[in-house]
Image (tube, rainbow, N blue to C red):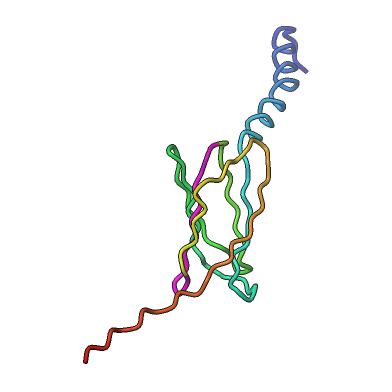
Amino acid sequence: MIRNPLLSIAVLALLVFVPPVVSAQSSQTGTITGTVVDANNARIVSARITVESTHLRRQVETNDEGNFEVELPPDDYSISVEKAGFKRFVLSSFRTQTAAQHKITVRLKVKVPAMPLKIK
């Protein structure tokens, strides 16, 4: 039992006002979730996703199901996806919003090896 009335008021104020501040801070980001697939809709594992703006750069990899997730503050970003054997995918302008969930599907194309030149 708290005997000091000022201390009781301070503790009550913390209990009332701290949870909204914590939840407000956690909703200051947006989330990009996505799946990386090939031309046959097969999921691509361990593809590297790079999301960057003028202020921030984040890199993640797709999981065992070809999915990824990145939390970011609101801004304009470019998104690139890379995996050996595939052409690099670039989305040059993507805007995130506070507390929004953005879902994308990236379809990578197989990289065709360059044919050597035959000189006669």
Among the 4 quarters of the image, the one containing residue 3: top right
The correct choice, above or below, for 43 with respect to 10 in the image is: below
Locate residue 22 relative to residue 12 in the image: left or right. Answer: left
Residue with the most extreme bottom position: 120
Write the residue at 49% across / 49% down. Answer: 92
Write the residue at 59% across / 58% down. Answer: 68
Range covered by the magenta-colored residues? 75-86
The correct choice, above or below, for 119 with respect to 53 in the image is: below
In the image, residue 84 lies in the stretch drawn in magenta: yes
Q: Quadrant of the C terminus?
A: bottom left
Q: Quadrant of the N terminus?
A: top right
The correct choice, above or below, for 21 with respect to 119 in the image is: above
Write the residue at 52% across / 61% down. Answer: 61
Locate residue 14 relative to residue 72 in the image: left or right. Answer: right
Write the residue at 51% across / 44% down. Answer: 77
Residue with the most extreme front position: 120
Image location of residue 116, percent across then percent down: 30, 84
Among the 4 quarters of the image, the one containing residue 112: bottom left
Image location of residue 62, percent across then percent down: 56, 63
Image location of residue 65, percent across then percent down: 63, 68
